[in-house]
Amino acid sequence: MFKNVKRILSVLLSLILITSITFAMFTTSASSQSVTNNSYTGEAPKYVFMFIGDGMTFPQIASAEAYLGKSIYKDTKVGIQKLSFSDFPVTGTSSTFDATSLCPDSASTATSISTGNKTLSGVINMDVTKKIKYKTIAEMLKEKGYKIGIVSSVSIDHATPAAFYAHQPTRSNMYEIALELANSNFDYFGGGGLVNPKGPKGDQPDALEIARSKGYNIVNTKDEILALNSQSGKVIAINPILDKDKALPYEIDRAEDDLALANFTKKGIDVLDNPNGFFMMVEGGKIDWACHANDAGASIQDTLALEKAVNEAVQFYYKHPKETLIIVTGDHETGGLSIGFAATGYSTFFDKIGYQTRSFLEFDNKVITPYRSYISKEDAKLEDLLPYIKAYFGLVVSSDEEASKRPGMVLTDYEVQKLRDALAMTITPAKDRKLNEAEQVIYGTYEPLSVTLTHILNNKAGIGWTSYSHTGIPTAVFTMGAGQELFNGYYDNTDIFRKLSSILKVN
Ligand SMILES: [Zn+2]
């Protein structure tokens, strides 16, 4: 009898143990997927804005806020100045991994946001076998009668904007993407141009002409763009000033009276506003490009340009508070940006970023390229470039007449040597350079002198970088308006689509 009781007890104990392990396993696997509220019962908003800062997550936002804080508090106090959208009523966090990597790309992450599916890096709105096409939130809303706008500060056929209207096995199918744009019937495209409107060899029918034949009004002067309104019909508005990648200039390089991302956002509202509502996606695409190059000054200014674009939506929101939803997020982090650096310890000096007047790219194009064209490898010397280094990045050598007025900006011997080494590499044209493993880490694929200058300036400010690629840091999701409460918590980027489709009542 006693033996039997002991046996029963032992079986019961094992059962309890197995049950608790199974429960633990179940709860562990459940928590590795997101458990978040994706169902909305309120009325669908009529006006939806989705802002995507490419490469913009917490570090990019925090560095812009620290930079603004420094200009307000000066030396008297430590503080930040929040961006308008980081003060939105609801803040969430989303994971960004894709089917390829924890460090995903913009094609797959935008596919997650616009369709709710994970896919491979580089794939736009198709599954991992590259056979099944996914319908996007923008296409679903177009069918429901919303007008659709797509805006970007990089080319409008780039991965993030394309992920709202195109379906391609690779983001490099730029011509096919341009054709999908021309055939999308979306109502407004604004910002950058098309990379390959006539195909990679330039021998295909012009995608812009095809768009024109489909009824698009194509404008590319400042006056025409500023004159756009609700009577303009379907519009493709291309910035009159584009770089070689058909993108707007970096915000830090933009002339004051040239068009900015905020202008294209405001014009989008003017073109799209109608009684059936609209959906507009606006990408701040050059935050990513600046962070790939490890240029914090350029990243901060492009983040502030995105904030100004968001503020256009905020003004609209206050006219239609019950019918508007604004979402501001990023697709992934770029560069491994951090506030804090090994050599500056617990101190930061964000005021030093204020000395930078132009992006790394302007320094490449306006200083390095001309210098390399006339100077021989033997004659190249850092002293020739010191006036430009001072003008572009504020950095000076100890013998400079202004050295005593800007002590934190004086180059140390160690830094001067780094610049001499970088110049020796930069003076060799890129195609003839052979970088060893250590040089690949310190220069990436960038112009060695420029990237060394941004590294030195950023490090002096207390800013560090760990990569020239994307990283796996989660991203922020700020929301304001109808349905905002769904965006609280920590969820996956695919849930952004699920929340939106519930809020907008699309399947
Ligand atoms: Zn990128």
Image (cartoon, rainbow, N blue to C red):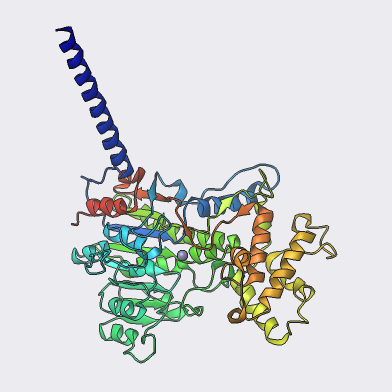
In the image shown, does 59 or 105 lie closer to the viewer? 105
Work out which quarter of the rendered image holds the C terminus and state it. Answer: bottom left
Which residue shows up at 22% across the image and 49% down it?
A: 43
Q: How many marks?
A: 0
Could you say where residue 28 lies in the image, as x and y percent from the top left? 31, 38
Q: Position of residue 99 (x, y in %)?
A: 33, 58
Q: Tell me if residue 159 comes above or below residue 496 in the rendering.
A: below
User: Can residue 312 be spotted in the picture?
Assistant: no
Please state which of residues 46 and 286 is positioned toward the viewer in this rendering.
286
Task: Find residue 395 and report its horizontal and vertical position in percent.
Answer: 73, 63
Quarter residue 337 falls in: bottom right
Task: Please tell me in which quadrant of the rendered image residue 184 appears.
Answer: bottom left
Q: Is residue 216 above or below residue 97?
A: below
Residue extending farthest to the top is: 2
Whether residue 314 is visible here, answered yes or no, is yes
Name the residue rendered at 29%, 47% in the picture: 483
Q: Residue at x 27, y 56 (%)?
A: 116
Vertically, is 501 above or below 32? below
Residue 505, image quadrant: bottom left
